[in-house]
Image: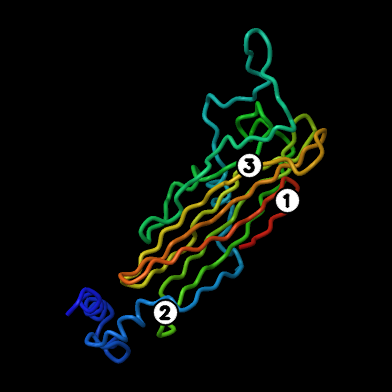
Amino acid sequence: MNRVMILLAGCLTAFGAGANTIISPLSQENAEKYFSVESYSIEQVEDTQLDQHTIDTLLDECSSSEISPWSRPTNGGLNTVVIDQIINYGKQIWEVIIANKPVVNVNEMSANALPQGVNCWTGLSNWELPNSNAYEITYKNGFGMEVVKFKYRLFYTYGGQFEETGAYLANVSVTPMNIDVAWGFKFDATADAEQVLNIGPMKNPIAGMELAMKWKVETPMKVSAQQVKFFVTGDGRDKAYD
């Protein structure tokens, strides 16, 4: 009995006797069918889990060293803020799922797009209420079984201004909500804030951020990798694309 057959036999034990009606541990064909990835889908779903506690968790807390730049003297003067130079002072890459387990420190998993010289989002004012969209990824095997179902949230705050100017981004994150993975499958996911830029005029900047969600499904027979990208703007728009 080869490695796939041994793994499949273990799968039948894990699933119980009823699994024998679907997969035979002696069938190479059925083993390949079980561990195959025949289709996957991504759809936007209702975010029913977003409450005030979740919002508070997703808002990054600045460290004590990250104070408003215009209140911190440097060489006898104030730090310079360049409103049309947009910088990500947050994370660039963070792990979302590791070996089927969600990463729990979600308040550390965010990027931002702030004017140069403002290293914390609380240094800006006039923030709008956060935007949130939920998405669900579903993989099915050759038997039509849902072998991976992963629900995640795109979250961001927008509209922050420096002295009544601009529209910046903060707390841009992709965070896990629910994950279900069948026996014998492994799922990993990461988020990557690939770039930030100014999509508005120099005198009244609008921050933009390209964010990629990348994931991998691994079985004893195959590894499949996909991604989806989001473009989020400081005036409250977001778009998903492949």
Q: Which mark is residue 141?
A: 2
Q: Nearer the viewer, mark 1 or mark 2?
A: 2
State which quarter of the image contains the N terminus: bottom left
Direction from residue 70 to residue 201 in the image, left or right: right
Q: Taking 82 as reference, is 104 above or below it?
A: below
Quadrant hosting residue 206: top right
Q: Amino acid at mark 1?
A: Gly
Residue at 68% from the left image edge and 15% from the top image edge = 78
Q: Nearer the viewer, residue 92 or 112?
A: 92
Direction from residue 202 to residue 38 in the image, left or right: left
Q: Taking 27 as reference, is 224 above or below it?
A: above
Q: Residue furthest top?
A: 76
Disc 1 target residue: 236
Direction from residue 24 to residue 90 in the image, left or right: right
Q: Element at badge 2?
A: loop
Q: Position of residue 114 (x, y in %)?
A: 66, 35
Q: Taking 45 as reference, is 15 above or below it?
A: below
Q: Element at badge 1?
A: loop
Label 2 vs 3, first from the N-terminus: 2
Label 1 vs 2, first from the N-terminus: 2
Q: Amino acid at mark 2?
A: Asn
As measured in the structure, the alpha-carbon distance from the residue carrying label 3 to the one carrying label 1 is: 11 Å
Q: Element at badge 3?
A: strand
Label 3 vs 1, first from the N-terminus: 3
Q: Which mark is residue 170?
A: 3
Q: Position of residue 159 (x, y in %)?
A: 73, 43
Residue at 51% from the left image edge and 74% from the top image edge = 40
Q: Amino acid at mark 3?
A: Ala
